[in-house]
Image: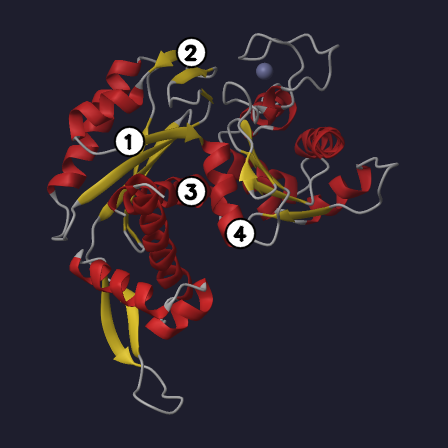
Amino acid sequence: MDIRETKDIRSLNKLTILNTIIEYKNVSRADIANITSLNKATVSTIVKELIEDKLIEEGITGESTGGRKPIILTLRENIGFVIAIDLNVSVINIMLSDINLKPVHTYHLPIETNNFEDVFADLCDILDDIINCLPPSTYGLVGISVAVRGVVDLEGIIRFIPDLKWMNINIKNMLEAKFKVPVYVDNDGNYSAMAEHHLNPNYKELVVITVDDVITGGIISNNKLIRGFLGFANSIGHHIIDFNYNEQCTCGKYGCWEQFCSSKSMLKHINKHMDVKDIDEFISLAKNENPYALEVLDLFTKYMAIGITNLIFILNCEHIIINSKLISAMPELIHDIHSLIVLPITNFQDISVSLLGDKAPLMGASQICRLNFFKNLC
Ligand SMILES: [Zn+2]
């Protein structure tokens, strides 16, 4: 075994022990050895390093099972901070969290222009303000992660955001050059899938559908995120569902799924008859059985069922989580969609509503920042 391999194993062990302390919260050295199957001497040496790195600390003593009371280890409170950015098509949501992923502050920046330079300048102003006011910590800001409602390639370059007409933007390099911290960029659907999988680790085959201004997806197969050859395997909102539809989608095709089921398109459909300003107003109209709202809701239910049926046949997933403000407000829609799903192969498919709501991409983005910070440190 060469030096490099020895270092790799040591780094992996360090990361495993750190993750065990995070996952199990209050654990002793003996608990860690039991959980990870590492020997006690290795655990003790690495725990000492983690204490010296100011990542963990010894806390209260636990219950004794005979001899000396074990010392409980916990992640320190003031290690540093991560910034997660959800670059939606009408608003940018920004969340500052500590390393324990406890949100400290959230900020909202409306997108009022399609000019990327202007939006980027406004975003940098907010980030400057956040960074200048960071509370004291050991490592300060350890990373920024950006969730994008569009096509992001494997290098983190924004290839296309149809609604904003932004193409080929290396926002990762731009943010790294300005803020001098590692920056991670991915599609919001991927980040949402990571956050949901973190919450539901038992699902090995999971699909997360986010229905917002646009529709995005995240696919977990065999516990791993599926990205595809160029990184846009999850662009489910742009799979064609009605090829006779004569209005053009923002992507250039006709009859995409999100042209019927995204919040933005539902407003477009109802506003042929009315003047509804947002999805909250639409929900209120639907609950009050406004006939135009019910007509659009009927279209939504039917097309959601078709889209989900397609996904089930292509991916044969174990569980589908839908993240939709509309469905969260009217959970009975899940039953209606379920009853329209045509499945001659199997009569069972578990579909549920996301418990994370619009925080899902921000939470996934924060997790990636923390994970990479620890990886780099170990
Ligand atoms: Zn499309």
Tell me if residue 1 comes above or below residue 262 in the rendering. Answer: below
Left of 78 or right of it: where is 14? right
Some atom of ligand 1 lies within 8 Å of the CB belonging to the residue at label 1: no
Q: Is residue 223 left or right of residue 168?
A: right
Secondary structure type for disc 1: strand
The reply to whether callout 2 and callout 3 are in contact (CB within 8 Å) is: no
Q: Secondary structure at mark 4?
A: loop
Of the numbered discs in the image, which one, if any, rests on residue 183? Answer: 1
Quarter occupied by the N terminus: top left
- Front residue of this view, candidates 290 and 217: 217
Q: Amino acid at mark 4?
A: Leu
Q: Is mark 4 within 8 Å of ligand 1?
A: no
Say which residue appears at 31% left-offset and 86% top-offset.
69
CB at mark 2 closer than 8 A to ligand 1?
no
Task: Kindly identify the amino acid type of the residue bearing the numbered disc 1.
Answer: Val
Name the residue nearer the viewer: 229 or 145: 229
Badge 3 local density, few (<14 within 10 Å), some, or many (20+)?
A: many
| Whether residue 151 can be seen here | yes
Real-space Cα distance between discs 2 and 3?
25 Å
**To which residue does mark 3 refer?**
364
- How crowded pointer 4 is (Cα within 10 Å; few <14, some 14-19, many 20+) is rated as some
Q: Are marks 1 and 4 in contact (CB under 8 Å)?
A: no
x%, y% of residue 260?
A: 65, 24
Q: In what element is the residue under mark 3?
A: helix
**Residue depicted at 38% across the width and 21% down the height:** 155
